[in-house]
Image (spheres, rainbow, N blue to C red):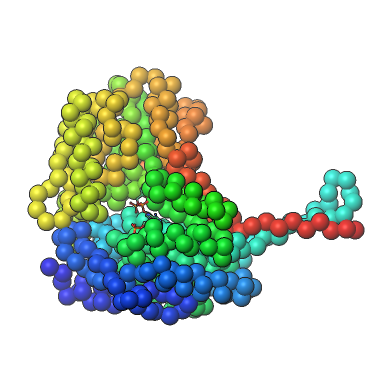
Amino acid sequence: MIETAERTVVDGIEKRLFIGGEWRDATGGETLTVEDPSTAEPLAEVADATPDDAMAALGAAHEVQAEWRNYPPRERGEVLRRAFEKIVSRTDELALLMTLEMGKSLAESKAEIAYAAEFFRWFSEEAVRIEGRYAVPPGGAGRMLTMKQPVGPCILITPWNFPMAMGTRKIGPAVAAGCTMVVKPAEQTPLCMLALAQILEESGLPGGVLNVITSSQSGSVMGPLISDPRARKLSFTGSTEVGRKLIGQSAGQILRVSMELGGNAPFIVFDDADVDAAVEGAMVAKMRNMGEACTSANRFHVADSVAGEFAEKLARRMDAMKIGRGTEEGVEVGPLIDGAQRDKVQALVEDALGKGAKALVGGDKVEGAGYFYCPTVLDEVPRDATLLHEEIFGPVAPVASFGSEEEAIAAANDTEYGLVAYVFTGDLKRALRVCEGLETGMVGLNQGIVSNASAPFGGVKHSGFGREGGAEGIEEYLQTKYVAISS
Ligand code: NAP
């Protein structure tokens, strides 16, 4: 049962669509149900947008684009700065909201709120640093001027696993660059995005710049927007499968596209690594968000001589984790997002066990209400186990051993994904060799986390293209115009 304090926080959030600076019900008054994954009970009803609502949102974004691009950069930055302050001052209430709709522990929700807010602070500072270039061409005749201009109205689609940070990571640079936008959060976690829209509204963002559509029919609601010539960019975070489909749809209008897709992160431990530090790193890389992160360590490749010690120490740490509703004191492992996700994790574990892997700890779901899964360490995982090749998205750590450095790099790269890899070694030369050899957009070197608002986050291969955060993040929302000047 939901407690009074929890109900108060949920009740305080707008449940309607945010279009053109106004809150309105979906056409026809339909709603969708948001569930608490720790109990599988309904938490709230939010507006279920129709394709017409989505079109109205794009219309609103298009209408104010010309005006918004001419807003002084400092003012755009200050909207973000005020929103940053508000998010930080409301951390406790926002963290509770996030835990209720997504399941992660309160401590993890607070960490996400801090990370999410940081994108607004970072891009409030980037808004005033959009620069061009003036040059004398090599031949000396004429002059060259390049200027950066906003791309135009953007479609932003976000997943449920980081329901606030995946939003600020797109909204922050779009606002800073002078773009307007239509945002669609995942059906499971609309409340965080609605809270964010309220905060931006209170922070002085002009009506129409940000429009939020919540819907249970993502394909039919967003498809027409992607095909509409008024939209100029699509930024998507989610699965590779859906991303691939959206890239195809974007071809019609030749949209600028940014894709933050799935991962299958290798975590490599060499024999010269500090094994205890590697286990600490592994706990963060694996268990952040119950393993429901694109950056989650999906497979552990450990040097033969230390594989046994590493797996045993990791199993002890995983076994000691407290499972429960994220709102309870000391809980470290909340529920998975839904029954389908838990069934998928279970099937992957059964496949590995059937092919000869050994469960050192866990290996099954937790009986009872909610979608809980036991922290699991699988040792001696054979190469053909499906979970070494697919994104697990759950608290399961498969350990496989390797002989040589070349073998480790080859195993790490043996995937169509390329988001992030983790490397633990005490040898600097090896570290550089391995970092250069890995086919990923990011590497965590002797650390189990890479996320940082000031760094360029993104992948290669089937993990997507484009970067979010850092100096690169705003570039995704700007286009370059070159002016040839006669002199
Ligand atoms: P998903 O199923 O691909 O959904 C992502 C978003 O796309 C949701 O808002 C979803 O809406 C929407 N969507 C689904 N089908 C659509 C369609 N045909 N047209 C338009 N929108 C559509 O992914 P997820 O399960 O939410 O998220 C988990 C995935 O995200 C994992 O693969 C993870 O690795 C990836 N991820 C990547 C990053 C990164 O930065 N690389 C970060 C976080 C997560 P509905 O859910 O309402 O249908």
Residue at image location 39% in from the left, 60% down from the top: 220
Is residue 281 something that shows in the picture? no
Q: Residue furthest top?
A: 403
Quick one: 341 or 230, which is closer to the camera?
Answer: 230
- Residue 359 placement: quadrant: top left
Q: Is residue 426 left or right of residue 1?
A: right
Is residue 477 something that shows in the picture? yes
In the rendered view of the protein, which quadrant contains the C terminus?
A: bottom right
Residue at image location 43% in from the left, 27% down from the top: 409
Q: Is residue 485 left or right of residue 414?
A: right
Q: Is residue 6 left or right of residue 478?
A: left
In the rendered view of the protein, which quadrant contains the N terminus?
A: bottom left
Give the x, y percent position of residue 140: 89, 49
Q: Is 25 rendered above or below residue 371?
A: below
Q: Is 452 rendered above or below residue 430?
A: below
Quick one: 334 or 277, which is closer to the camera?
Answer: 334
Q: Is residue 366 left or right of residue 134?
A: left
- Residue 29 placement: quadrant: bottom left
Give the x, y percent position of residue 389: 33, 33
Tally of numbered tags: 0
Residue at image location 34% in from the left, 22% down from the top: 402
Give the x, y percent position of residue 294: 37, 46
Give the x, y percent position of residue 85: 43, 71
Q: Residue furthest left?
A: 368
Residue at image location 84% in from the left, 45% down from the top: 138
